[in-house]
Image (cartoon, helix red, strand yellow):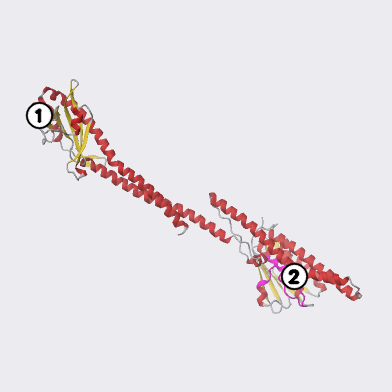
Amino acid sequence: MRLGLRLFFAFFVINGLAAFFVLRVFMVEIKPSVRKVTEDTLVETSYALAALAAPELASGALAQDPAHSLFARQLQSYTGQPVKVWIWDTRKASLDLRVTVTDEKGLVLFDSAGSDVGADYARWRDVHLTLRGEYGARTTRDIAHDESSSVMYVSAPIVDGGRIIGVLTTSKPARSVQKIVDSAERKMLRGGLLFLLLSAGVGFAVTWWLVLHVRRLRRYAQQVQAPTLQEEALPTAAPPSPQVPHMPGELGELATAMESMRRRLEGRDYIEGYVRALTHELKSPVAAIRGAGELLQEDLPEPDRQLFARQVVDQCQRLQNLVDQLLQLSRLEQRQQLQTQGLCSLRESAQQAMAQLASAAEQCGIGFELSGEDSQGPWEAGLVVLAISNLLQNALDFSPRGSRIFVELAPSCISVRDQGPGVPAALLGRLGQRFFTTPRPNGERSGTGLGLSIVARIMALHGGSMQACNSEPGLCVTLHWGQRRGA
């Protein structure tokens, strides 16, 4: 079961159980509470009517002619009145209060219903306790197995001169208040159902909010991984670093901790990859220097001694170039933004790069040709010159003596094309990877394999791209400059 369903189910079950128990308590308490209020009203009514009946019972008028006594006539006028009233949301259409008066022996002298005159009520609990000076009340069912037929009886003593001379009893059938109980229960059920629906809605909203943030955190965690060696070597092929999701509370702290962990792992893997690649590249020149050094310790003819000494110098120069370019690439890979000062001209940058390599090109008998329309952009001039210089140096390494290198300008674009052997189609995709080189026209591998890596990193900083293709003859490398602005 997925996390969201588990959370929603747990939230709904907890709220459902809470609602069930709360509703059960209320439902259980409704009926007793209504009956308590009804009994309280009957007590007050009984004592008030008992005070009114006391004079007539003491004088004997109520016992001699109960039907025509003042007390009887007043109650009969009460029972005969039509009633059509609304008590809140419950309609009342009849008066259900019944009044009986018994003498000190428990015989019924007066019954507002006119049915039990002369009956002996002394056996009933309410009358019996009241005649003894105690509180008398009872609830009796007219039909033994029907709770709705219950009738509440409350008795009050009729007192004359401090002596109990009779009992006045008021009674009210349970059905008269059952409508109120039913109405309250319906309201409670509707309220409980609404509570459950609102709880489900809140639970769904909270669960969805939490799952949404957890999914964002999961996507971020899936994206948090150090780049591969190929991605490190070719920045344009590496996916961009994921943005840390902004989330509240502990989830936000977890995302920040994961970002810190990502940076530490990325730095560690980056160093490991660098060390492995650098170790591989150092093997050849170190082995060559060692071999030449061991041979120089022996007695050698002068031509051989000069050959091995020149080999030591060449390999040391190769190591020096490797270290310089590694430092240069490392600084570029640590940078996250440009440092621009106004607009940069591609023509001026190309002219400056050609001027730097003019001497080397003249020694090789190679010429430069610059053509096309100039374009300007918010680029860092020093990095633009460095990228073009590396392309020109790469073209010089592969161009035959007496050939030409063509530098063509276009809007936000510059191409460097040589007349060398080109690159096998299967290897074009690897150009720009760190330490990747191809054989020179003379069969040597004197390059460090870092020149185009530096170019690729510069293009990544500018939001641009580097593309290489064979031009028959030669290789054409095109730089497309983006519009990323510096700090």
Image location (x, y in percent) of residue 454: 71, 65
Q: Is residue 359 visible?
A: no
Residue type of the residue flagged with mark 2: Leu
Q: Does the magenta stretch include residue 185?
A: no
| Front one among 309 and 409 | 309
Q: Give the range drawn in magenta.
A: 429-456
Q: How far apart are marks 1 and 2 (CA)?
A: 132 Å
Q: What element carries label 2?
A: helix
Viewed as shown, does residue 287 lie left or right of 487?
A: right
> Which residue, given by chain and number where applicable, does mark 1 sit on?
66
Image location (x, y in percent) of residue 158: 18, 26
Q: How many marks?
A: 2
Q: Residue 99 carries which label?
A: none
Q: Is residue 446 magenta?
A: yes
**Residue drawn at (79%, 70%) of the image:** 287
Above or below 47: residue 309: below
Q: Which of marks 1 and 2 is nearer the N terminus?
A: 1
Residue type of the residue flagged with mark 1: Pro
Q: Quadrant of residue 329?
A: bottom right
> Which residue, given by chain and number where applicable, does mark 2 sit on?
392
| Front one among 319 and 387 | 319
Viewed as shown, does residue 339 lie left or right of 64?
A: right
| Front one among 33 and 353 | 33
